[in-house]
Image (cartoon, coloured by chain):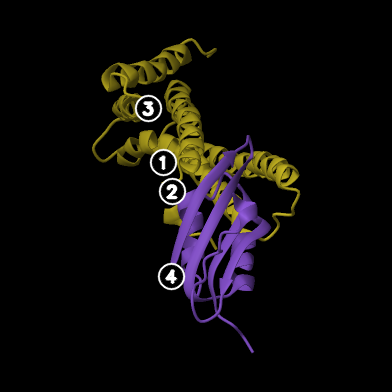
Chain colours: A purple, B yellow
């Protein structure tokens, strides 16, 4: 059984080229992705650290990761996954305060 | 295969190509002026021979432009990839980064080869009219004028992209053509 992924948050490292716009556009063109938010977290001399938030009705995490690698980036970690029939936000617990 | 229009939008690709184009175009134009003045002063009897000698120079400098830049940029871009790979701790073989580098290298090499072809062939064209409309002296003078104009265009272009006075920048480059023509007058024989 495959459960659709509706949100994926990635922490990734990429070279300066291709730029953040081209990066976001290419990932947004993946099947099942309806929107992308790319945030520059840190710029180093040769590389950039991005936080990429993807939303869609059926995101294929494997295809997204392959696309990122094809662009020369590497996924450091998957920081958030929302999957299932509806979007569930994380609920606040006493530890979050 | 990376789209050539996409590559040409990248400022670093354009900037490096521009440098090779102008630098080798400058070499080619001065070589051409040297060849045509030298040929006239040496008493080459017809324009077609001058044109053929010049074409030899065009082939030489054109090949040099493409070949040297192909190798220079192979080394430079490979060094850049190695630097990025070290920072990323990953292999960039067969990624867009690597393909863009190969595409950029091709654009750089072509620009480097076209520069001397334009610079050499344009000043030679009046020699094709020798015996029809122009004497050898006239063809030489028109050739020098075209060469100076080509150099002026290179200078004016550089002036316009760097927000300098394009006329002054053009005259500065064009002057080199006149200097080469003048120096040739002192060649032995």
Rendered location of residue B170, percent (x, y): 32, 22
Q: Nearer the viewer, mark 4 or mark 1?
A: 4
Residue B140: image x %, image y %? 35, 27
Looking at marks 1 and 2 on the same chain, the residue that comes earlier in the sequence is marked by 2
The residue that disc 1 covers is B48
Q: Indicate whether B12 appears above or below B160.
A: below
Q: CA distance from mark 4 to mark 3?
A: 44 Å
Say yes or no: labels 4 and 3 on the same chain.
Answer: no
Judge by depth and name the residue closer to the eye, B33 or B155: B155
Residue under pointer 2: B8
Secondary structure beneath label 3: helix
Label 2 Cα crowd, 10 Å radius (few <14 / some 14-19 / many 20+)? some
Q: Which residue is mark 3?
A: B158
Residue at the image point whose x is 26% and y is 41% from the top: B132
Q: What distance separates the C-alpha of mark 3 from that of mark 1? A: 33 Å
The residue depicted at 23 percent of the width and 37 percent of the height is B133
């Amino acid at each position: 059984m495959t459960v659709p992924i509706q949100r994926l948050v990635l922490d990734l490292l990429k070279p300066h080229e291709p730029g953040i716009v081209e990066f976001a556009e290419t990932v947004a063109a993946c099947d099942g992705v309806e929107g992308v938010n790319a945030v520059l977290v840190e710029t180093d001399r040769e590389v950039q650290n991005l936080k990429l938030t993807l939303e869609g009705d059926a995101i294929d995490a494997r295809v997204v990761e392959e696309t990122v690698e094809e662009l020369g980036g590497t996924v450091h970690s998957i920081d958030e996954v929302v999957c299932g029939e509806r979007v569930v936000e994380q609920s606040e617990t006493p530890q979050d305060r | 295969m990376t789209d050539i229009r996409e590559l040409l939008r990248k400022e670093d690709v354009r900037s490096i190509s521009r440098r090779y184009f102008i630098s080798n175009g400058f070499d080619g134009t001065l070589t051409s002026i040297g060849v045509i003045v030298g040929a006239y002063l040496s008493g080459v009897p017809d324009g077609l021979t001058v044109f053929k000698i010049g074409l030899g120079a065009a082939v030489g400098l054109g090949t040099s432009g493409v070949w040297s830049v192909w190798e220079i940029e192979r080394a430079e871009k490979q060094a850049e990839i190695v630097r990025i790979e070290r920072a990323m701790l990953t292999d960039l073989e067969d990624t867009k980064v690597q393909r863009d580098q190969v595409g950029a290298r091709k654009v750089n090499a072509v620009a480097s080869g076209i520069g001397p072809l334009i610079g050499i062939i344009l000043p030679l064209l009046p020699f094709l009219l020798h015996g029809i409309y122009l004497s050898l002296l006239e063809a030489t003078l028109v050739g020098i004028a075209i060469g100076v104009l080509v150099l002026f265009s290179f200078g004016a272009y550089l002036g316009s992209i760097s927000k300098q006075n394009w006329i002054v920048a053009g005259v500065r480059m064009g002057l080199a053509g006149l200097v080469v023509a003048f120096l040739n007058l002192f060649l032995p024989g």
